[in-house]
Image (tube, helix red, strand yellow):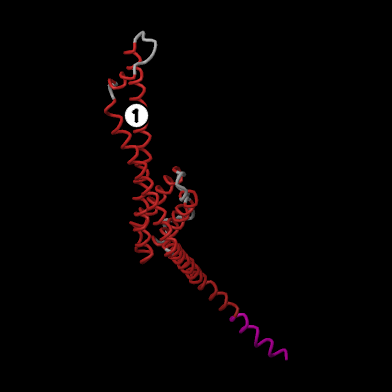
Amino acid sequence: MKAQRVKKLDPTRTLAENAARIVRVRLEELRSFAPQALDCDQIEAQHDMRIAAKRLRYVLEATEFCFGGAGETGRRRARDLQDVLGEMHDCDVMLPRVRGHLAQLHARDAASIRDRAGEAPDLDPRLVGRAPHRTAYRGLESLAVYLEARRALLFDRFVALWRVQEEKGTWDRLARAAERQLDRARKRRRAARRVERAPEELAHANAAEALFTQRSPAEGDGK
């Protein structure tokens, strides 16, 4: 999954401001996958959400101090999401491999039994008991069942974790903390611009005062 581009990053600005811009985008990215990822069959969305949680966690590991308690909590919960979604991903990777290997063994044994049947008009069921890989089936099938059950359990953990954090406002607090940093940065820049303009404005004011002073006597004589 390609990361969303973070706009307006500037090396001349503070770490807190740049971190806030990154966190805001990474958090929006994470939350955007939730509607689909909370559907147990949406494996791709769950995988993308895991990557998004990892990216958010990594930026917070370096910058969480900029966001106070919201940064630390956000980093911990992003790590929790990454962990549980990562374990689900492991099951998603392993299950097709186990099933594929089992299918290969079935095909090899079917071919072997057919060869042993030779020219017989029908297959003797007893030949199945001599299949080369017959002892491997049960172990692989048991492993597949275990992986299916464990994935279901992990999915329930993921859903519960996400819903609890939404109820606690974990992500909302982190978003507000990022916005506060951006608001402070905007106020600092406006103040800096006023300071930069102050000498010019003062010069204009002095020139206007001087002009007024020069004109005042002449205006008085005219009266």
Residue 127 against residue 173 in the figure, above or below = above
Quarter containing the C terminus: bottom right
Residue 141 against residue 15 in the figure, above or below = above
Q: How many marks?
A: 1
**Is residue 116 something that shows in the picture?**
yes
Quarter containing the N terminus: top left
- Is residue 142 left or right of 38 when viewed as pictured? left
Give residue 25's position: percent from left, percent from top: 46, 55
**Is residue 1 something that shows in the picture?**
no
Helix, strand or loop for the magenta stretch, by majority? helix
Give residue 17's position: percent from left, percent from top: 43, 61
Q: Residue at x 46, y 46 (%)?
A: 45
From the viewer's side, name the closer residue of 50 and 61: 50
Indicate yes or no whether the magenta region holds residue 218: yes
Indicate yes or no whether the magenta region holds residue 109: no
Q: Which residue is mark 1?
A: 102
From the viewer's side, name the closer residue of 17 and 87: 87
From the viewer's side, name the closer residue of 135 and 159: 135
From the viewer's side, name the closer residue of 190 and 197: 190
Q: Residue at x 36, y 62 (%)?
A: 73
Q: Amino acid at mark 1?
A: Leu
Give residue 88's position: percent from left, percent from top: 37, 45
Q: Which residues are magenta?
A: 209-223
Q: Quadrant of residue 2?
A: top left
Give residue 161's position: percent from left, percent from top: 39, 57
> In the current view of this chain or complex, which residue is farthest to the right?
223
- Is residue 177 left or right of 221 when viewed as pictured? left
- Is residue 179 left or right of 94 when viewed as pictured? right
Label 1 SS: helix
Q: Quadrant of residue 175?
A: bottom left
